[in-house]
Image (cartoon, helix red, strand yellow):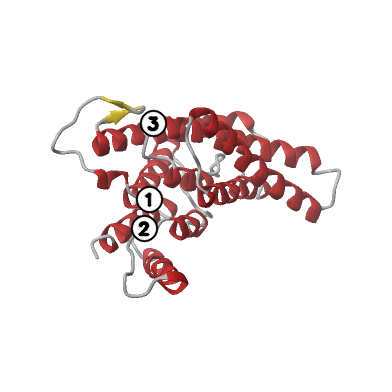
Amino acid sequence: MKLRYPAEAFALGIILFSSGMKEAFAAGILVIFTSVFAELLKNLLEKAVPAWSLRLCVLIASGSVCASAFLIGFAALGITLTNGQWIILFLTGLLCARHALLGNTEGEYGELLFESAIAWGLWILFSICREFLGSGNIFGNTVLTASFQSKALLGPAFAFMTAGLVTAAVNGILKKDCKGLNSLFPALPAMVLFHPFTVDSFAGLPGTLWVIFVPVFLFLSVKQTMKFARTGRFFRGLPVEMLAAGFIYMILSIY
């Protein structure tokens, strides 16, 4: 059975905003809002405009709505978005639109909201764990400071892992899988934004391109290898590849 919720968009959102409960709570609502908007717009225009125009309208509108909603919503919460995050949020909207245009939701708004709510709840739960284990805070408030806590848990490596664990958990609850989804869509933008290491020997554009190329190349290699791996049904595809990206970042961050 098809996943009704846009798992690729959720995965990218989780990578961006899962280091704290506040941002996870808000981001989940906004991704769900964009998903419903994309599906609604597609259904409204489907019989009124040509197919090429429909795709263009839904893609541009969904990307714009997503980026704008995040900008306004996060500003209200006192959270500042970087230019890079804002651009990638436009891509998140495109992933919501892609999911709608592929016909995965099929106008089943109830199922879309139900599956999205499960993903959102797990997103918040894992974000609480990351925030507490990384800083001792929950919703920005200090709860406990202990020696077992580590700031490394707030880094991009564990953001990728969180995306993988959340999508796998959703699959397990819904008894579905991520067949037909492409992990490159959430992974590549995140790898452009988050760099696992820095290069001191050469700075500027060459250094930036190198720190982007290395994790992308390794991810593509692992992704190809994963096709032959005997992973469980619920981890197959997007979830295990997000976990692999997390381990790649963890290893590269050592150097």
In this picture, residue 109 sits left or right of residue 160: right
Which label's residue is closer to the chain start, 1 or 2? 1
Q: Is mark 2 on a helix, strand or loop?
A: helix
Q: Do the residues labelled 1 and 2 touch (CB within 8 Å)?
A: yes
Of the residues tagged 2 and 3, which is closer to the observer?
3
Q: Which amino acid does label 1 sit on?
A: Phe
How many badges with numbers are in the image? Answer: 3
According to the image, label 2 marks what residue? 245
Q: Is mark 1 on a helix, strand or loop?
A: helix
Q: Residue furthest right?
A: 48
Instruction: Work out how far the residue at label 3 is from the one at label 1, CA to CA, in angstroms.
Output: 16 Å
Please give the name of the residue rendered at 62% of the width and 38% of the height, measured from the top-left corner. Answer: 34
In this picture, residue 65 sits left or right of residue 81: right
Q: Nearer the viewer, residue 215 or 81?
A: 81
Q: What residue type is labelled 2?
A: Ala
Residue 109: image quadrant is: top right
Q: Where is residue 239 in the image (x, y as percent from the top left)?
A: 40, 50
Residue 147: image quadrant is: top left
According to the image, label 1 marks what residue? 160
Image disc number at residue 21: 3
Please give the name of the residue rendered at 69% of the width and 49% of the height, measured from the top-left corner. Answer: 59
Q: Is residue 105 visible?
A: no
Crowding near the residue tagged with mark 3, few <14, some 14–19, many ≥20 C-alpha atoms within 10 Å:
many
